[in-house]
Image (spheres, rainbow, N blue to C red):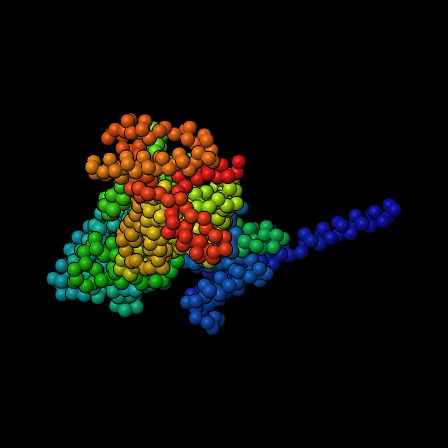
Amino acid sequence: MIIRYFIILLLIQLIYLIGFSEEVDINIFAYSVEDGYNYKAYVDGFNQYSRKNNLDIKVELNVMTRNNFTVSFENSYIMVESLLKKKNHKYDIFIYDYTYLKNYSPYLLDLKNLFPKEHIDMYNKQVLSQACEYDGKLLGFPISLCYTAIYANKVLLDKYNKSIPQTWNELIETSKEIIEKEKALNNTDLVGYNGFMYDADNGLCSIYEFIYSCRDSIDSPFPEFTSETTVNALKLLKRIKNEISSDEIFRSDSFFDINLFEGRGIFIRYWFSNILYSLENSPYILAKIPGIKEGISSTAFVSYNIGIVNDIDEIKKPAALKVIEYMTSREFQKSLILKNIIITGISSLYEDYEVCSIIPYCNVFSNVQPIIKPLYKTNDYVAYSEKFTNYFYEYLYNNGTETEESVLKKIDDITRIYYITTDLKETSSGLTILILFSTTLTIMILSLIFLFSKKYQGLFSFIFKPGWIMMIIGMIMILVSGFTYFGPVTILKCNLKFILLSSGLTFIYIPILYKFIINFPEINKYSKWVYNHKLIFFSIFILFDIFIDGLIQIKSYNIKDIIINDGENFQICYPSNVISIINWIMIIYILIIITIISLLIFIEWNAKDPFYDIKFIGSSIFINFISFTIHFILYFTVIENYVLYFKIQEVVIYFITITNYITLYGVKLIYPRLMKENKINEMIKNIRICDSYVKNSYMNVNMTTTNKSNTFAEREENLEEDDISNINISNINKSNKINERPSLSPSKSIYSRILDYHYNGSNNNDPEIKIESTIS
C-alpha cells in the first residue's frame, strides 16, 4: 500500500512538472496596409523577452496584407469579424482597426479589471476612451497610432522671421504676409494651407479636427453642430480657403496630386509619416495643429488595437494577458519609439529625456488633443461620411445659397432623432397639447364630484356609482397615453401606451356591458349569474387585461427609425411579430365586447326607461370605432414629418377621450340645462305617467319597491325649476301610453326575437329589482 501510494504521488508530481514545462503557443492575427513590419517587431520583442525569462510562452504572428490577401482588402473587417465569431478559435489575440471596434466588441475580452490601474492610466485617456473603449469596456490597447500634424515650411518662416503659429488667425496672417512678399519676388505658386478635404473619409477627419480645434476651451467636448461655436468654425474655415488657399488645393490629395512637399506649401496638414519627415533636404518641420485660441489644438488619429478573444481557453488566458502586458508596457513601448517604429499612446514618453534627445517631434505628441472620427453616430459610417461631406463640400466649394446654419442643420439632421418637447424653439405644438391635455384631465377628475352630489344623483342612475368611476378612470387612461408621445421614444413608453389604451377601453366598456346584460328584456340565467357575481364578472376582464399587459412586458415593442432624406428623422413604436399577434388578440377582444354591446343596444333601442342613455352609448361606440380605425391605419401610414405625426396621434387620442367623456358622462351634466323652459310641464307629465306605471308594475312583485318611492303628487309639489338636474334623462320624452311587453313565443327564431325586442322596447325601469324578485 505504501509503495502504491508513493507511485501515485510520483505520477502526480510528474504530470504537474510536465504541465508547467509545456510551452504555451499564442496565435496573433493582424492585418496591415503595409508589410506589418511594426507587428513583427512586437512579436520578436516578446519572444526574445519570453526566452530570456523562461516564460514558456511563444507568440506566432499571422499577418494579412495586400500582398497575401486575394479578396478585397477594403472588406477585410468582414473576415476578421467572421473569425471572431467562431467558437473554436485558431487565434487568441487580434490586432484590429479601431474603426470596427463596435462590430468586434461582442467578441473581445474586457481588459479593464485584468490589468493594474497604473498600467491603464499610462495611456492617453482620450485615446483609450475614443478608440479602445466601447459600452464601458476596455477592449484593447493601442499599439500603432497615427496622428495628423502641420508640416511647417521652416525655410520660409526663417526667411521672414516668423514663428510657428499657435492660432488660426496667426496662421492666416503669417501665410498672407509670406505669400504677398514672395509674389513680389515672382514666386506665385505658394499655398498658405491645404485643408486636405478631398474625399469622404479623410475629408470627414479634417472637418471634425478643424471644428474641434475651435472649441471654447481645452476641456470642452466636441461642440454641437448647431451651436454658435461650430457656425463660427465654418466661417473661419471658409476664410482660410478664400484668403490663403483655393478650392483646387483644398480638394486635392496634397501628397499625390499637387506635391506640395516640394516646397510650395507654407503650412500643410497631413498624416504624420516618418518617410515624409525624414526626406533629405526637406524644408518642413513638424508642428501642432493650431486652435481658435492659444493652448487649444486638435489632431485626428487612427489606431490599431490589440485585444483578446472573450472565449479564449482558460489555460491560455494568463499567457495571453502576459503577452499584452509586455507589449503595452512602458519599457517596451519606449524601445520601439527609439527605433522609430511606432507612435505610442503613452504620452509621457514624449517627455522622456532619452526619447526626446533622439526623436525631434516630442513637443508635437507630448500633449496631443486627439479627436476620433464619428464612428458611433450611426450604424453605417460609410454612408454617413459620404452624406456628411457632400453637404459640407456643397457649402465650402459651391457659391450657392447655403449658409453655415443651413448646412449644419442638414448635417445634424443626418443622425439627429427629433421628438416633441415643450420647448417653443422647436415647435409650439408640444406645449399646446400639454396644456390642453392637462386642463382636460383636471376637468375630468374634478367632475367626479357630481357623482356624490344629491342634486345630480338622479342623472347617474343608469349605471351604479363605482361603474361611473371606473369609466372615468378608463377615459383618463386613454388621455394619459397621449403623454407617452413626449420626449424620446423608449420601449417603456411603447409598452405603457398599449397598456393605457387597452385597459382604458376595458374600464369604459365593462360597466356598460354589465348594465346591458342585467337589463336584458327577459330574465335569463346569464343575467342572473352576472348580477349575482358582479365582482367575478369584472375580475375576469381585468385579469385578462393584466395577462395581455404581462405578455407585452415579456415581448416588447421595437423602436423604428423613420429616416427622412434631407429632413428631420424621428422614431415610432413598431410592433414585432409577437407584439402584432398580441395586438390582434386585443383588437379581437375589444371588437367582441363592442359587438355584444352593439347587439344589446339594438335590442334595447326603443326601450322607454334608459332611452337617452342607450342613444348616447351607441354614439360613443360608433365614434370609438371610427377613431380607433384611424389610429390603427396610422401604424401602416408613412408620415414624413414628426410634428404632423405627433399632432395626428394626439388629436385621435384626444378625440376618443373627449367624445367618450361627453357622450357618456358630460352630457348628463349639460343636457338638462340646455332644455327649454317651456318643456318642463311636459316632462312633469311624462314623469307622472312613468311613476304611476312603475308603482303598478312592481306592486305584485315586491311591495318594498312602492314603499321606497314617494307619490308623484308629493314630488310635483317639491319640483322647482332649479332642480331640473335631478330628473333622470332616461325619463325624458317618454310616450304617454306605455304598453306592457307582449309575451314572446320561445318557438320564434333568435332573429325574430331580437327584432321583437328592438321594436317593442322594454319597460325595465329597475332591472336589478326585477332580477331580485325573480330570484326570490
Whether residue 217 is situated above or below residue 59 in the rendered picture: above
> In the rendered image, is residue 82 in sight?
yes
Whether residue 35 is situated above or below residue 616 in the rendered picture: below
> In the rendered image, is residue 359 in sight?
no
Whether residue 28 is situated above or below residue 612 in the rendered picture: below
Percent position of residue 614, x then y: 35, 45
Front-most of residues 644 and 274: 644
Picture quadrant where residue 722 is located: top left
Front-most of residues 317 and 432: 432
Image check: 745 left or right of 652?
Answer: right
**Residue at 30% over, 47% down:** 655
Front-most of residues 526 and 498: 526
Whether residue 465 is situated above or below residue 376 in the rendered picture: above
State how many labels appear. Answer: 0
Percent position of residue 209, x then y: 30, 54
**Residue at 46% over, 67% down:** 65
Q: Which residue occupies the extreme bottom position in the image?
A: 70
**Residue at 59% over, 52% down:** 317
Image check: 28 left or right of 277?
Answer: right
Percent position of residue 38, x then y: 46, 60
Percent position of residue 678, x then y: 20, 37
